[in-house]
Image: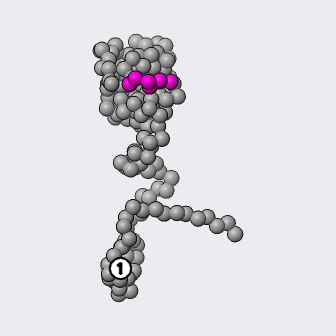
Amino acid sequence: TDRRWFVLWSGTPRMDEQVAKRLWVWYAAGGREAVTAWLMARDVSKFNAGATPRLTDAKAIVQAAGMSAAESWLADEMMERRGEFARGAVVGPWIRLIDRLQGAAPQNVKIVVPALLHAFQEARWIDMGLVHSRAHPTKKHLVVAPEMAHLGKTDLRALAEQPNGPLRVVG
């Protein structure tokens, strides 16, 4: 047989013995049935086990702990709409964007393309693919902030192509 062991850890202190006894008395006096009835009455018709879980503070902390310094700084810049990300839309080539970002990055933080691409994911920015328009006939990769995705690609490309003001140096 295939046995899988799971370890559940909690920082919660052990339940007081008197509280535990009262809980078991309540369970025996109909508490189990009450809990079952409450669970059975819940509408789970829209439950989707394959859906992306919502982002909680705890999940954000775990994700941030796994990021490099560059990824963390970039994701923070994106979420706070600072510097190059203030408009909510950026276009490639990514090496040019990285050259501009490197001047504003904290000391000893090296920004590379994979860190930028990972930061886009962590900040939930949306890849709009290669985009061109009459005003900008050359196809360029466009990535936008989540709240901007409903706008037309032509408008987003024009927004991303606007010249930047001076960068704010952090650090």
Residue 149 drawn above or below residue 22? above
Work out whether residue 28 or residue 128 is closer to the camera in this orientation and state it: 28
Q: Quadrant of the C terminus?
A: top left
Residue ID for mark 1 = 17
Q: Identify the residue at image location x=39%, y=80%.
A: 32
Q: Which residues are magenta?
A: 106-112
Work out whether residue 108 or residue 133 is closer to the camera in this orientation and state it: 108
- State the image coordinates of residue 16 (x, y, percent, origin top left): 33, 76
- State the image coordinates of residue 101 (x, y, percent, origin top left): 40, 20
Residue 109 drawn above or below residue 123? above
- State the image coordinates of residue 141 (x, y, percent, origin top left): 48, 22
Q: Report the amino acid beneath label 1.
A: Glu
Q: Identify the residue at image location x=35%, y=83%.
A: 21
Q: Residues within 10 Å of mark 1 (few under 14, many from 20)?
A: few
Residue 9 drawn above or below residue 99? below
Image quarter of residue 103: top left
Farthest residue, direction right: 1
Residue 68 drawn above or below residue 160? below
Magenta-colored segment: predominant secondary structure: loop
Q: Quadrant of the N terminus?
A: bottom right
Asked if residue 58 shows in the view, the reply is yes
- State the image coordinates of residue 165 (x, y, percent, origin top left): 30, 15
Q: Is residue 64 magenta?
A: no
